[in-house]
Image (cartoon, rainbow, N blue to C red):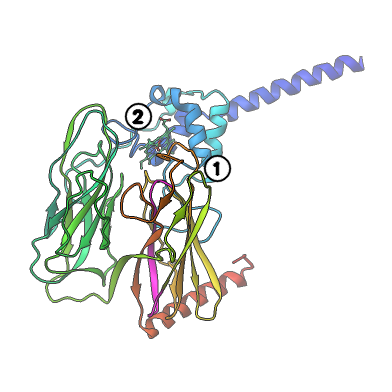
Amino acid sequence: MMKTLAVTSGVVLALTLALAGAAGAQTFTKDVAPILQKSCQSCHRPGQMAPMSLMTYQDVRPWARSIKQRVTERQMPPWGIDPHVGIQSFKNDPSLRDDEVRLIAKWVDAGAPMGNAADMPKPREFDDSASWHIGKPDVIVTSPKHVVPAEAADWWGSYYVDTGLTEDRYIKAIESKPGKTAVVHHLLTYAVDADMTGDSNGDDSNAETSGEFLNEFAVGKNGDLFPEGTGRLLRAGTKIKFDFHYHSVGQEITDQSQLGIVLYPKGYTPKHVVYSKQLGQPTEPLDIPGGSTYVRSDGYTRFNQAGKITAFQPHMHTRGKRQCIELIYPDNKTEQLNCADWSFNWHIVSVYADDVAPIYPAGTVLHVISWHDNSASKANPDPRNWVGSGQRTIDEMGFAWITWHDFTEEQYKAEFDARKGVRRTTTAQGQPQ
Ligand code: HEC
């Protein structure tokens, strides 16, 4: 008798569990589709750069395993910033939340069920309009026509184009607009000196010049509008360097991209002038033996004035692995800001949220730590080669693009005190800092 009861209750328990599981199970239409709409479809839809569409259940089903892998390894959506170190509040962070990643993984493990068709959300509408998101630009700079063959290796190269500007002016807003989004994997623009020439045309022996980083095109990005009273200086006679990564997509496509710039009125000087420069160049030439893993280099730049860092972008080439940045304050205390995994496929600018953007007193040193990995991997062209510092794509680099503006002593003190207030409130509530 006891035995029967036990068996029966066992069956009942199993049944209950199965039912509860079914009722609570994630489905594509109800749970997964909204996440894909929000975080994936900007790239994963017809005509965009990603290799497959993730719009419908039929599109998505064959990719379920691969989706689980890419989202749990935090490779998709592309971002790079290590979520376990340093500042985590950015204006442009596309990452999935932990619960979204868990949900996708559970859904895939349960066989990626479609669920109820009626639960499917309305398709997301995309603003594919040819208009500028920053308003009507005062200056439009256009890159030369570039033919992307139907099938070819990826193309990294640059073009230099005059702005036509005859006087110094301040930039209020700026937007890069690719002609054909399917083939423009990334587009970065820089302001460079008038004597810079040499369209590289895919010849990667051409020098990678410095200059001031202006703007990046990334899918779903609508341009940079500087906060009121903040701007970038664009000097008369400056040239624009268009840095492209073109990607073949099975048919021949001709691209011509544009940079649009809205200027402050003539004679206006913003309160804060914003700079973007290559900081923390390695102190020693890079020396990366064939087959080596995790070769470290360090670079330092001293800020002679107090200021605020508004954006960070690592820069390395194909052997780049990871970069961390920290501040060494005048009292020798060190604070880690961020670490980012690097992939040469993705040049991502991380823009700090205003209230946590790092501020520092005069005399602070920025410390940039880069790691290169020259072991065999999909991304490494040839792990047998020694690699050193240099300008060509096959050479290496390890610096950070930092965007910042200076503070006067009074401005720094005011912002420092304002933030102290915020911290005290948090501590009073007993929350960890
Ligand atoms: C900024 C554009 C962009 C966004 C946003 C994006 N992807 Fe991707 N995705 C790409 C590109 C480009 C590739 C191909 C290059 C690569 O594999 O890195 C890719 C590759 C993939 C792959 C591998 C395909 C293969 O051939 O094996 C998967 C899976 C994937 N993405 C899933 C996702 C999911 C899921 C999301 C949202 C959570 C997402 N992606 C968001 C651009 C994007």
At a point 19% along the width and 30% down the height, the residue shown is 252
Res 24 visible: yes
> Looking at this view, is 296 or 243 the one in front?
296
* Three-letter amino acid code of the residue under disc 1: Asp
Q: Looking at the picture, how far across and down is residue 222, in whole percent?
A: 27, 51
* Three-letter amino acid code of the residue under disc 2: Ser
Instruction: State which mark lies toward you, 1 or 2.
Output: 2
Magenta stretch holds residue 240: no
Relative horizontal placement of residue 26, taking residue 230 as reference (left or right):
right
Relative horizontal placement of residue 100, taking residue 123 as reference (left or right):
right
In the structure shown, which secondary structural element does the residue marked by tag 2 occupy?
loop
Q: Looking at the picture, how far across and down is residue 209, in whole percent?
A: 26, 59
Location of ligand 1 given as a quarter of the image? top left
Q: What quarter of the picture does the C terminus occupy?
A: bottom right
The residue that label 2 is drawn on is 53
User: Real-space Cα distance between discs 1 and 2?
Assistant: 23 Å
In the image, residue 308 sits, relative to residue 131, either above or below, namely below
> Looking at this view, is 328 or 409 the one in front?
328
Relative horizontal placement of residue 70, taking residue 411 as reference (left or right):
right
At a point 31% along the width and 54% down the height, the residue shown is 391
What label does residue 320 carry, if any? none
The residue that label 1 is drawn on is 99
Q: What quarter of the picture does the N terminus occupy?
A: top right
**Which segment is the magenta one?**
302-319
Q: Quadrant of residue 117?
A: top left
Q: Looking at the picture, how far across and down is residue 51, in whole percent?
A: 34, 31
Res 88 visible: no
